[in-house]
Amino acid sequence: MAISDLHVAYPENREIVEKLRPESDSDWLLVPGDVGEFVADVEWALGLLKERFATVVWAPGNHELWTPKDDPVKLRGEARYRHLVEICRGLGVLTPEDPYAVWEGPGGPVTIAPLFVLYDYTFRPPNTTKEEAMAWAHETGVVCTDEFLLHPDPYPSRDAWCRARLRETRARLDARDPAIPTVLVNHFPLVRQPTDILRYPQFAQWCGTVETADWHLKYNAATVVYGHLHIPRTTWYDGVRFQEVSLGYPRERRMYGRDDSPPLREVFPSEDAT
């Protein structure tokens, strides 16, 4: 099962999380990011879910990496991420820094690989520079809050942090057993195509990196699970199922008539869906 973008600061979302239950004692839950902005909220939600599901796997979203002024935890950048990793380890929740677990249940075995690779502003219009794309975003008023709250310390920029994460993640994926297919779990889509339907195309540059465009093939993915876009759906690229599993904001669920949709998605194994 999987769900992302819980955003538990919203009371409606917090209530949904409190009601989440597995279908069986053996269910695993994949949580690809944006649980919340405050460290205490992330710890609360993941701790609750770990009490209910056999295994919980978390990959960070951009919101967990924010440093809100009202959060008692003032850590920034890499230090904040590592702090969240240690909290997860205390809860028994798996992270991108832990050995990859292997699902041996129906459809298995598959290696469950939570990823943290960030973005590098390369999901921008063709033949434009990062500076030009950023100017376009500012001119139109579509600027991600990351620019103000997601600090890359100790790296000089978010794209530099992304490059470091790409190196580390490739090394870990290359070291896995190549004979076992993977379920790749990342907050941001690994390919650019899902961003083509964004209402505001300027936002795409905060949604991933072209460096992961072939990972679903290179690392033999049985399925790819992601969030961030708040557009829950299933698409296929090169014969591989990509599943966006966002809960999203209450106003979005009301606007698009998703209030009655089951919040949890069965992502492996699963029936074809659109």
Image: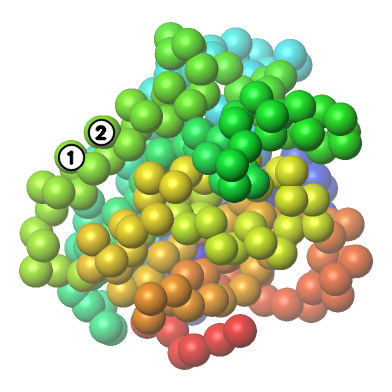
Q: Which residue is mark 1?
A: 171
Relative height, residue 58 to residue 71 (above, below): below
The foreground one among 246 and 93 is 246
**Which amino acid is tagged 1?**
Ala
Q: Secondary structure at mark 2?
A: helix
The answer to whether 30 appears left or right of 39 in the picture is left
What residue is drawn where x is 44% and y is 47%?
Answer: 210
Relative height, residue 63 to residue 273 (above, below): above
What residue is drawn where x is 33% and y is 41%?
Answer: 96
What residue is drawn where x is 73% and y is 77%?
Answer: 261
Residue projecting furthest to the front: 127
Relative height, residue 7 to residue 148 (above, below): below
Q: Which residue is mark 2?
A: 168
Residue 145: tell me if it is visible: no
**Residue 60: x and y, percent?**
49, 40
The foreground one among 133 and 55 is 133
What residue is drawn where x is 25% and y is 33%?
Answer: 168
Q: Are marks 1 and 2 in contact (CB under 8 Å)?
A: yes
The foreground one among 162 and 252 is 162
**Residue 31: x and y, percent?**
49, 54
The foreground one among 199 and 249 is 199
The answer to whether 87 appears left or right of 128 in the picture is left
Task: State how far apart marks 1 and 2 are (Cα).
Answer: 5 Å
**Residue 226: x and y, percent?**
51, 58
Relative height, residue 207 to residue 155 (above, below): below
Residue 72: tell me if it is visible: yes
